[in-house]
Image: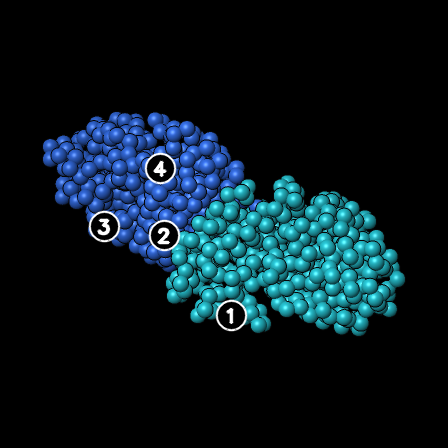
Chain colours: A blue, B cyan
Amino acid sequence: MIKNRLFTPGPTDVPPEVLNEMAKPVFHHRTAQFRDMFAAVNDGLKKIYKTSNDVLTIAGSGTAGMEAAIACAVPRDKKVLISNGGKFGERWVKVAKVYGLDVDEVTLEWGTALTADVVKEKLATGQYGAVITVYSETSTATACDMQAIAEVVRDTDALLIVDAITALGVLPLETDAWGVDIVASGSQKAFMLPPGLAMLSVSEKAWKVIDTIEAPCFFLNLKAYRKSIAANDTPYTPAVTLLRGLKVSVDMINAIGIEKVWSRTAILAKALRTAAEALGLKVCSQTPSDSVTAIYLPEGIGDDIRKNLRTKYGCSVAGGQDGWKGKVIRVNHMGYVDPLDTIGLIAAIEYTLADMGADVQIGKGTAAAVEVLKDWA
Amino acid sequence: MIKNRLFTPGPTDVPPEVLNEMAKPVFHHRTAQFRDMFAAVNDGLKKIYKTSNDVLTIAGSGTAGMEAAIACAVPRDKKVLISNGGKFGERWVKVAKVYGLDVDEVTLEWGTALTADVVKEKLATGQYGAVITVYSETSTATACDMQAIAEVVRDTDALLIVDAITALGVLPLETDAWGVDIVASGSQKAFMLPPGLAMLSVSEKAWKVIDTIEAPCFFLNLKAYRKSIAANDTPYTPAVTLLRGLKVSVDMINAIGIEKVWSRTAILAKALRTAAEALGLKVCSQTPSDSVTAIYLPEGIGDDIRKNLRTKYGCSVAGGQDGWKGKVIRVNHMGYVDPLDTIGLIAAIEYTLADMGADVQIGKGTAAAVEVLKDWA
């Protein structure tokens, strides 16, 4: 029997423990039962976020979380620096423009990341109220040096707003210690849930700015979430089923320990990169993210590879977008995925490339990955 | 995250499609809804059994099915030949003795199988009313040449009663064409269900014998099942939820085609045997079954390997029984298991053996399996 395996960089595979929890009968949310559960979720999220501040949860996708941050926390009297190195950076520029913000867009070649040096130079002008950047750009499988960027921003008046949707719970991220002001994440990545929740941590520095802004939005107004969470509640109807699932997944992550989850994810990514190299394939990114890997397809192999992988081996991977369309595959390392999955996928990629006529030595990539992954557990 | 993976030779992994079907609300069984579903199950079972006779389903484990056959279909005025090459052969001898049958037990060295020559020689005496044998002995991972044995029995008056619990739906078995009189199977093997159902095909030749016997049993009396199945029904309360699951799994198997399932299973088993050889490990059986593989553990490695495989890599395999206890592991190839699972398991076995101090070259077995499995799909 062929098993279906989700290797897309969101949605990621959902553990049976989470699915079972979400299959339980719905209960009403204006109850002590809900508030107790939500309080436990929020405590668990703080550990994963590595913050002592509240982590707000919105019933919405990751985009809703980033829009809330952009609408509520970017000062109107200054410029906002936004890095655009892929589809998500591009989206945050669009959102900021909808809100009439004065956007300074730093356009990056796909596969490269914003550097701390660029941020430092810009902020030195004193013209910026906020920096918005993507920690791990899903479309290009590229991560920036977030710690270095945070180091540059933290001693200025500007806020650092980070799209950590494919980074939180996967890549090292010390929200408080690094001084990241807003960290946005989503449910369908490292949290191993279906899509439908956005989570944001907000620093004291950010709240001070938010309090000065009359944000032109209602559902996404962070002030409402701050007020409610003080009573372990939500301002509008919460997605109770997803929150129940989140309780389970947060507990699973904290039982392992977030640092261990980071190092395990890193080794899965390293195994795939090493396998690609062994097969003579090139990793797309100059600074690859450990949450998702993008690999250039060999000459003569197109996007059909995804259909073949799915049909013959049950493996779903993502393709390329825009200029990378038909030229790359992207593979997830976040959440409910382990070395055995990764090894199996690499074998399936080898079989499929060979079936399609590519010049690859079956087993070479798999063996290289097996060697790397011996240090995983 | 570590995933739990069931590689025990029963219970085997249950597909989500089957789990979801079984999670639906229970309906009453004395209804047209039940009879329609049961009729569809029975049609599907005939295809997998390769028989035009009815396949009876009992709410019970595989042992209940074999007991029904032994109690109802073994002539009392003749001897019954029973092969005992492992824990299950041993059990059928016990059952036959409970019913006071005149048992001629052929004791086999573990890892060897009953041969057609032995059966031929015994039957030539004219003293036997039935031959009971295990097609695939789970405890020793050993298969006999069932076609050759059937060839010998079919032209005699004796019935051939086969424990195909870890064979039906996995190893080639042409019930009608080979003339096998009773074929017993169970739900928790190739049918990818939880335990709780036993299925039996019964030939015309067998029914003629059954009609001459006043079987000293009620629930397991095959005559009651024959009468009910004519109206697509069961004599006693059926395990409705398991039957719903069986409908889904039977459809899954028939969508692929039973011959394809046989050949796919064979290649999974071959991959593991090849990997074992590459790692310098010895397969236990002289005539290995393709449904389950038993491998001798290297010197100095004991049964702890199973706990280590489960704890560190989420892989459950079976150990040895009786004289093989602590000396072997047994790995499933039946049902909902595919090349990617098998490759991952082999890597996990390599890691675990190396962790435990065995002299194995990590990746060597995996690469050997990857090579074999390229012909699977």
| Quadrant of the drawing holding the C terminus of chain A | bottom left
Determine the chain carrying the residue at label 1.
B
Which mark identifies residue B286?
A: none
Q: CA distance from mark 1 to mark 3?
A: 51 Å
A117 is higher (above) or lower (below) than B359: above
Q: Are marks 4 and 1 in contact (CB under 8 Å)?
A: no
Q: CA distance from mark 4 to mark 3?
A: 39 Å
Q: Position of residue A342 (x, y in %)?
A: 41, 47
Q: Amino acid at mark 1?
A: Gly
| Label 3 CA crowd tier, 10 Å (few <14, some 14–19, many 20+) | some
From the viewer's perspective, tell me whether residue A224 is left or right of residue B150: left
Instruction: Read off the residue under disc 2.
Output: A371
Kindly identify the residue that appears in the image at 74 percent across and 61 percent down.
B117
SS of the residue under disc 3: helix
Asked whether the viewer can see residue A92, the reply is no
Q: Amino acid at mark 4?
A: Leu
Q: CA distance from mark 4 to mark 1?
A: 44 Å
Q: CA distance from mark 1 to mark 2?
A: 28 Å
Kindly identify the residue that appears in the image at 45 percent across and 54 percent down.
B365
Determine the chain carrying the residue at label 2.
A
- Disc 2 or disc 3, which is closer to the eye? 2
Q: CA distance from mark 2 to mark 4?
A: 18 Å
Which mark identifies residue A176?
A: 3
- Disc 1 or disc 3, which is closer to the eye? 1
Q: Position of residue B282 (x, y in %)?
A: 51, 62
Q: Position of residue A238 (x, y in %)?
A: 42, 44
Q: Are marks 2 and 3 in contact (CB under 8 Å)?
A: no
A249 and A365: which is toward the camera = A365
SS of the residue under disc 1: loop
From the viewer's perspective, tell me whether residue A80 is left or right of residue B370: left
Instruction: Read off the residue under disc 4.
Output: A281
